[in-house]
Image (cartoon, helix red, strand yellow):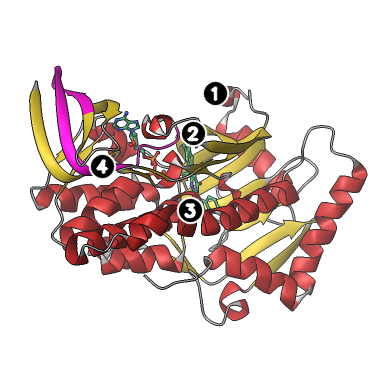
């Protein structure tokens, strides 16, 4: 069986795996990325849109932010629509200058793939990791299938960046693993429409008909979401039915710009955390370790925050033979992960209408939203989470 060796074996070419590989390359550490899907599939995935300042700064610092700097949109605030009113939360003012950036996960994924391949670095597509062994030995092994052959990647460390449905989390022994989860009784029906967004910044809309969100992927691309039941048949919807419903939910005089639907998808909503993030030579990052409902725009940002710490931990190990940050990796990440899980859960339960929700529940949601817009403290609390919490230590 063919065996290849490297220092860090990375499972998954999503934002976590690709950024980690770039960070290691910048610090002279070898890695190989194994990605089960083909190149076209990975490059076509839409997903996240809003990036925290920490995420943008990290992409730029690691040399993958050039196109982001040219083509992204900076947002200084958000709109909250409720009770058929529209309110602006000036996030920049509330946080003393911090903003968010809209640049799709798809775009940043393609940028990192292009740079990885331009540098001639190993990124194996259609390479499915099947098993991980020897996690408590000096060298660990990833057993994978590639080009119809069974192969082994031998490495010092393994980064499980293989997302929620990957294999790496399953290699943490049940006797030390704890998982926590909540599945929400609704999902997001998301579309991409060839039409300029009617509002230049993101709109979060609470309505008795359900939640709606207006975002974008460029000056002429609207990214729109509607809360729907988990089992919604999204193919039954015509474009006009979607746009009509969207206008009703956003309200306050808003009129969506209509255009051709070029993508539609149904995203389930779940909160999930698996502790710890490490077992022996295996380190989990991103969706492999945690999932948040997309309402707070945190999924990819949390993945990047994990990797920023893991990349620095590997750097200190190989450069200074210092394994302290590797040993503290799980504890440091979980401290931030749980705060972001809370924010994402709170954003979701405050803005979405649950089945059998009572009138009192709805009044509590409206009072919370009203508090955000009427109170500087309430607005600041939302804003500091939205732009991205700072780390307790600097990395
Ligand atoms: P990813 O899931 O992106 O990447 C994991 C990679 O590992 C995949 O490419 C997968 O093919 C690969 N893999 C899996 N098993 C493997 C194996 N055995 N061998 C090799 N490779 C393997 N976040 C937001 O902030 N806003 C949003 O609007 C939003 N919308 C989303 C919609 C959907 C449908 C989904 C699923 C997620 C969404 N997210 C959103 C969250 C999303 O952006 C994730 O947080 C982000 O992709 C996490 O990145 P990674 O941890 O790299 O995992
Ligand atoms: C998106 O653009 O996909 C997006 C924006 C804001 C969110 C969630 C998703 O809160």
Give the crowd class for mark 1: few <14, some 14-19, many >=20 residues within 10 Å: few
Respond yes or no on whether mark 3 lies under 8 Å from ligand 2: yes
119 magenta-colored: no
Element at label 4: strand
Q: Residue placed at 13% from the left, 60% from the top?
A: 28
Q: Earlier in the sequence, mark 1 or mark 3?
A: 3
> Between residues 315 and 17, which one lies in front from this camera angle?
315
> Between residues 166 and 384, which one lies in front from this camera angle?
166
Would you say the residues marked 1 and 4 are in contact, meaning their CB atoms lie under 8 Å apart? no
Q: Which contiguous range is marked in magenta?
A: 143-164
- Front position among marks 3 and 4: 4
Would you say the residues marked 1 and 3 are in contact, meaning their CB atoms lie under 8 Å apart? no
Would you say the residues marked 3 and 4 are in contact, meaning their CB atoms lie under 8 Å apart? no
Name the residue that disc number 1 marks: 235
- Front position among marks 2 and 4: 4
Would you say the residues marked 2 and 1 are in contact, meaning their CB atoms lie under 8 Å apart? yes
> Is the magenta region chiefly helix, strand or loop?
strand
* Quadrant in which the C terminus is drawn: bottom left
Q: Earlier in the sequence, mark 1 or mark 4?
A: 4
Q: Earlier in the sequence, mark 2 or mark 1?
A: 1
> Between residues 292 and 379, which one lies in front from this camera angle?
292
Q: Is any atom of residue 308 visible in this view?
A: no
* Quadrant in which the N terminus is drawn: top left
Q: Residue placed at 46% from the left, 63% from the top?
A: 52
Element at label 1: helix
Give the crowd class for mark 4: few <14, some 14-19, many >=20 residues within 10 Å: many
Name the residue that disc number 2 marks: 264
Q: Earlier in the sequence, mark 3 or mark 2?
A: 3
Give the crowd class for mark 3: few <14, some 14-19, many >=20 residues within 10 Å: many
Distance from Cα at disc 2 to Cα at disc 4: 30 Å
Q: Earlier in the sequence, mark 3 or mark 4?
A: 4
């Amino acid at each position: 069986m063919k065996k290849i060796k490297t220092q860090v074996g990375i499972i998954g070419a999503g934002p976590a795996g690709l950024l980690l590989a770039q960070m290691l390359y910048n610090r002279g550490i070898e890695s190989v990325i194994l990605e089960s899907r083909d190149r076209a599939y990975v490059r076509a995935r839409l997903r996240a849109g809003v990036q925290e300042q920490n995420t943008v700064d990290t992409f730029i610092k690691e040399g993958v932010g050039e196109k982001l700097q040219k083509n992204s949109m900076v947002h200084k605030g958000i709109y909250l629509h409720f009770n058929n009113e529209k309110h602006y939360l000036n996030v920049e003012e509330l946080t003393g200058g911090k903003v968010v950036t809209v640049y799709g996960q798809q775009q940043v994924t393609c940028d990192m793939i292009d740079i990885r391949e331009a540098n001639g670095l190993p990124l194996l597509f259609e390479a499915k990791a099947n098993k991980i062994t020897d996690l408590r030995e000096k060298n660990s092994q990833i057993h994978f299938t590639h080009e119809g052959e069974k192969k082994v990647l031998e490495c010092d460390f393994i980064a499980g960046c293989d997302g929620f449905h990957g294999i790496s989390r399953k290699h943490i022994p049940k006797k030390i693993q704890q998982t926590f989860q909540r599945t929400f009784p609704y999902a997001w029906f998301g579309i991409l429409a060839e039409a300029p967004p009617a509002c230049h910044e993101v709109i979060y809309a609470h309505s008795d008909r359900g939640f709606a969100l207006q975002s974008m992927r460029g000056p002429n691309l609207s990214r729109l979401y509607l809360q729907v039941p988990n089992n919604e048949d999204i193919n039954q919807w015509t474009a006009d039915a979607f746009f009509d419903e969207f206008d009703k939910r956003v309200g306050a005089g808003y009129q969506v710009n209509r255009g051709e639907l070029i993508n539609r998808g149904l995203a389930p909503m779940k909160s999930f955390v698996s502790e710890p993030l490490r077992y022996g030579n295996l380190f989990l990052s991103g969706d492999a370790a945690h999932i948040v409902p997309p309402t707070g725009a945190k999924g990819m940002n949390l993945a990047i925050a994990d990797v920023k710490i893991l990349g620095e931990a590997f750097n200190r190990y190989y450069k200074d033979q210092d394994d302290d940050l590797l040993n503290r990796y799980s504890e440091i990440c979980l401290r931030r992960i749980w705060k972001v899980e809370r924010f994402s859960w709170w954003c979701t339960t405050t803005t979405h209408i649950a089945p059998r929700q009572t009138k009192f529940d709805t009044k509590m949601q409206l009072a919370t939203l009203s508090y955000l817009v009427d109170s500087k403290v309430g607005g600041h609390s939302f804003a500091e989470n939205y732009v991205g919490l700072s780390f307790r230590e600097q990395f």
